[in-house]
Amino acid sequence: MVTILAMFAWDVEVKTDPMTDQEDVFASVKSKDVDRYGQQSTLYVRCMDGQFDVFVATTEVLEGSLNDELSAVWRFDKHPAERGILSEVGQTSAFFGGRSHDIAARLRTADKFLIELPVYPDSSRVFEFDVAGAHDGINQVAGACGVVLPGTVPSAEIGSSARIPDTPTKAGPSLDTAGQATELCVQVAQMIELSLPTTAILEGLAGATVTYEDLRCLAEGDTRDEVLVWAVESHFAAE
């Protein structure tokens, strides 16, 4: 069974295996431009067979290395461009691999996503995607794979989202935020377990209503990470 839901420019497709009832979920959006063959490329956020992936599929031939790796540059909205190594599949798809959780989380709040990939016979080509409205679709994909993306507080555990404040505060912990802080510590532990970079963790926690004192657990026990502790302490440093 296949169900397709339209969300702004995004499509969400759910495929259910009639024998196992397992759901594979695909959220996708087409590129604004077309390639040399007059075809649009597609940005996918996918849960298939329990595997969570973000990748770009195109009819262009991608020029990767002998190890099926390729160098890519991508950018969210007006933020600085980033560079990294992606995995090439079938010469026409570029997978973010271990970066998929971070990329998907940032796509949820972005309006535009650009990615430059090496293509044959040109040296490279930039693919542009309007990604506004991705939030619910990407959350649906992540939920199908049991993935907690950076910035997501499981609704079953917390009634409302809790994030680190953008401005420093010296206010002491409160009864209202104590429970949220505990859940945030659990969330951070999950992020560290997934080997997400410190920057992704801090982005996921940006804007919380808890204080630094509430989050002392970030510097304790299994969640301790020296770089993360330094970043959080700097964030909450007194003016």
Image (cartoon, grey):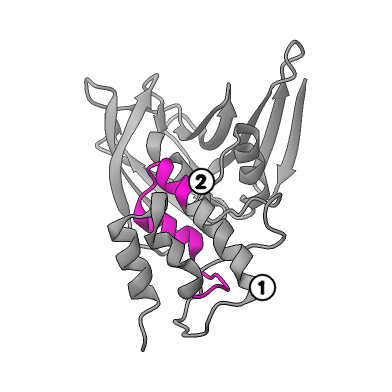
In the picture as drawn, the residue positioned furthest to the front comes out as: 221
Q: Amino acid at mark 2?
A: Ala
Hey, which quadrant is residue 88 in on the image?
top left
The C terminus is located in which quarter?
A: bottom left
- Is residue 61 positioned above or below 195 on the image? above
Q: Position of residue 19 (x, y in %)?
A: 75, 10
Return the residue nearer the eye: 15 or 206.
Answer: 206
x 28%, y 48%: residue: 83
- Is residue 51 positioned above or below 230 on the image? above
x 65%, y 31%: residue: 25
- Is residue 93 positioned above or below 146 on the image? above
Q: Position of residue 106 (x, y in %)?
A: 49, 53
Return the residue nearer the eye: 46 or 225.
Answer: 225
Q: Amino acid at mark 1?
A: Asp
Q: Which mark is residue 176?
A: 1
x 58%, y 73%: residue: 209
Relative to residue 196, is residue 107 drawn left or right?
Answer: right
Q: Which mark is residue 226?
A: none
Q: Is residue 109 visible?
A: no
The residue segment tinted magenta is 189-211
* Distance of label 1 from label 2 (alpha carbons): 30 Å
Q: Which residue carries the number 2 mark? A: 104
Relative to residue 180, is residue 23 drawn left or right?
Answer: right
**Considering only order in the chain, which callout, 2 or 1, is on the residue closer to the N terminus?**
2
Q: Position of residue 3 (x, y in %)?
A: 77, 29
- Element at label 2: helix
- In reply to whether residue 130 is colored magenta, the answer given is no
The N terminus is located in which quarter?
A: top right
Q: Position of residue 64 (x, y in %)?
A: 27, 27
